[in-house]
Image (cartoon, coloured by chain):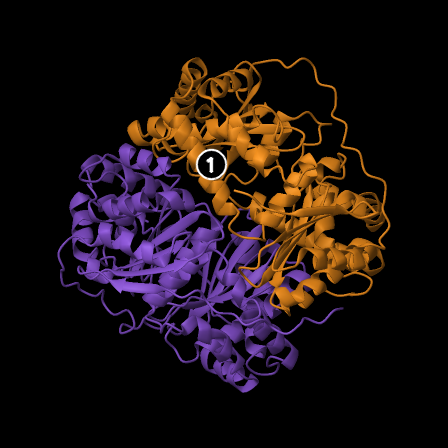
Amino acid sequence: MPAAGPDSVFSLPAFSRTILTNGTHVWAAENRRAPMVTILLLLPVGAAADPSDSPGLAALTADLLDEGSNDQSAVQIHKALTRIGGHLSAEVWSDATVLGLTTLSRHVREGLRLLFEITTQPRFDPDDVARVRDLRLNRVRQMRRSPTFVADRVFLEKLYGTHPYGHLAIGTETALRKMDPAAVESFHRHWYKPTSWTLVGVGDVSPDKLLSEAAQVWDQAGVVASEQPSDVSVCEPRPIQDRMIFVGREEAVQSEIRLGQLAVPRSSPDYYALRMLNMVLGGQFVSRINLNLREEKGYTYGARTSFDWRLGRGPFSLQVSVQTEATVDSIRQAVQELTDIRASRPPSVHELDLARAALTRGYPRSFETASQIAHAGVQLALHRLSDDDYTQFVPRIMLVDADDVSRVAVQHLRPDSLLAVVVGSRSEVFEGLGSLGFGAPVDVTQTTTFSEGN
Amino acid sequence: MQITFEKQTLDNGLDVIVHEDSSCPIVAVNLWYHVGSKNEQPGRTGFAHLFEHLMFEGSAHHDSGYFRPLQEVGGLLNGSTNTDRTNYWEVVPTNAFERVLWMESDRMGFLLPALTQKKFDTQREVVLNERRQNYENRPYGLVPVALMASLYPPMHPYHWVTIGDPEDLRASGLDEVKEFFGTYYHPANASLAIAGDVRIKDAFDQVLRYFGELPAGPIPKLPKLPPEGAAGGGDCRLVLIDRVELPRLYLSWRTPPLFASGDAELDLLAEILTGGKSSRLYQALVHQRRLATDVIAGQNSRELGSNFSIVATAAPGHHLAELEAVITDQLGTLQADGPTEDELIRSCTRLEADFVYNLQTVGGFGGQSDQLNAYNVFTGDPGYITADRQRYASATAERVRTVAKMHLGGTQRVALSVIPDESGPDAALPDSVTVTPR
């Protein structure tokens, strides 16, 4: 088998930057692969800024931005969008809202203008608020029947409790029902401020042109002092009491499983060592958990682990759906893997080489397209990383050695205090869950899926 | 937009297509075998996809997992099977290009010696779990099984879904794998596209080195389509009871194949109907009257014949018959009056933007190398992109109207109601026959 040749030198396209008089940061980079431009607006306010009795408000607000502005109705906005071949997106994460507009490069000015109008002048008409709220309500309702959604939601709720990270961005049915135009207006007025946001444009346009077009369109509205969302790193979630949580899904042919715990923020000095650990454990096809549960045992279509890198302490979780009769053994195997990697079977030289190679040699692939580069810019801005963070990634990974990975495994993985969430068939699975060392399983079915209040 | 390339065909029939782009130090390799679930027989459905899984379990000169040597060099890889073809792709740093060719040629030429009963049994279990995860254990998951079975008669190659029937999968055996391999997995039935940081001449030389010696097999014929009676009209109404919160309606028609006359017009029609919030059905169903929580239309283009579908979920308190009435009414208006010029231009622009967006990348599903192979396998010309774009640029409102009338009015329509287990049968469209896909 041919060896790979020497690695090529890689450098990320540089961002040109400017700050507008109203405080907006604008970044631009060039990518000529296709005649299009991706524009992303980062607002560092997300689901964690939802008022404690209003989970889902940040996402509802973002979803309402294109439903009519001061000047145009929703239909007019969307016709204008389709005329430029534009696609609008709104993602709400725990720490941020990212609005996006991708368009053919010949329409970049109109794209910038539309995005500005949508972001800064939404109408929030009562009929539109009611309609979009109901659409989201119905989506949450439908997701009661999705084992994946239920597992994710229950996992966050149990892991975080009342901490701002304890809910999915879409929120809950109870909260959504109460949301009204006043709540949305208030959220928008409070958080959508030019001094908070960063506009990132990447594509088939010169950076200078992109910066000057952005300045012409976006340098409006007075400078207003902006408040920061409450510091999610300060409040710590309470320790968990019940560690084995069960949600019934009658006659389910598979169990949806989440095993996890709190991890560390993106800013942690252990970030690079933990990226290596995750690769070995469950971060790609050739990883311990996937080779075990899928390739060896055939229990599943795929198993993975991930660290969710947030401003505060994000979750670490193992995620897998397995055939029902393999539920108990799968959890046992998973816990064993998490135990062994920090004790009896630390990562081998070969495993570390493979993890390192995946992270370093595969790196340029992540910066091929305009969309990828724009999203990379958003990450730099959100986490306030230094300009050379991406260029430094590979050298920093190369500095991580076996001792570092072992140390962070011992320090950050705690198999004895994992939280487990299982969504599956009660008659076939529930009793066996008590034999896994998590304590007595707690059945939360009634309060989770069928209650009107959720 | 253009994807420049050069094409050669080796003596053993392997088509090789190369596109140079050194703006990023990566190479995409994409290999299509012209076999899919259409080549299966009833009783052995799911086989082409199961076979795809086996291709990752080792070959004679590398008798262990396919992923490791490629993840070792920083590669990303995957494969997929559909009704018409099976594709395998890798995206690697420039310096690992040769390794990919080695790996792909080894499994093309020498898969069988590494195949064992244990690998076969394990991957069958994996596939059964894939089916459970993606079809059996999710809301509306089994709809494709019921829909395809009612759109196409039992002997039609599209009657069954690619994931197959669990009983068929359990009944299949290792020796059948060998026959399948010999029939479909050889150079004359394959197309190899390479895009990225390569030099064209060097790429052809390397491919010849690794693939040139592999023997050709007979080129399989396209499966024969069963005789079907004169196309009747009418509604085939079905109801599926499922663990869902809201009822959903699936309307489907059989339509012209990929690239055939009418295919592009139907793409445009789907965009006019549900593309974005200013579209006709979104406005009528979701925005104005709030009868539905969502609606999506699509021309699902395939080699032997496509299907056009409109799918809408009822908002609480509303009946599927209300949705059906609005959809039929809107379709009728388009069939009588056609779209406006503005709608046509906007839809064309949207589709152009989607197309450009997908072709940003050299690799993966739908990237440049995958698209080159699609053009080559389905039309014989990797440069079909120009003709492809022209189909849309030259579409007229009148053509969209007549195509809509010809293919979505008067021909048979399948109307599948999916209703919650708690609701009574009245939640479906009237006169619906119960189906129970497993």
Given residues A346 and A397, the one toward you in this image is A397
In the drawing, does residue A146 fall left or right of residue A122?
right
Pinpoint the chain carrying mark 1.
Answer: B
In the drawing, does residue A183 fall left or right of residue B95?
left
Please tell me which residue is depicted at 71% across the width and 31% down the height of the picture: B157
Q: Amino acid at mark 1?
A: Leu
Residue B152, image x, y percentages: 65, 26
Please tell me which residue is depicted at 71% across the width and 64% down the height of the picture: B98
Dividing the image into 4 quarters, which one contains the N terminus of chain A?
A: bottom right
Give the colour chain B carries in the figure: orange
Farthest residue, direction bottom: A403
Given residues B240 and A51, the one toward you in this image is A51
Residue B126, image x, y percentages: 66, 54
Residue A450, image x, y percentages: 38, 46
- Residue A161 visible in the shown view: no
Residue A301, image x, y percentages: 61, 55
Dot 1 falls on a residue whose secondary structure is helix
Q: Which residue is mark 1?
A: B351
Q: Quadrant of residue B222?
A: top right
- Residue B128 visible in the shown view: yes
Query: Badge 1, how many Cα within 10 Å: few under 14, some, many 20+?
Result: some
Q: Quadrant of residue B70?
A: bottom right
In the drawing, does residue B369 fall left or right of residue A31?
right
Residue B235 higher or lower than B154, as above or below: above
Q: Quadrant of residue A376?
A: bottom left
Circle count: 1
Given residues B162 and A215, the one toward you in this image is A215
- Chain drawn purple in the picture: A
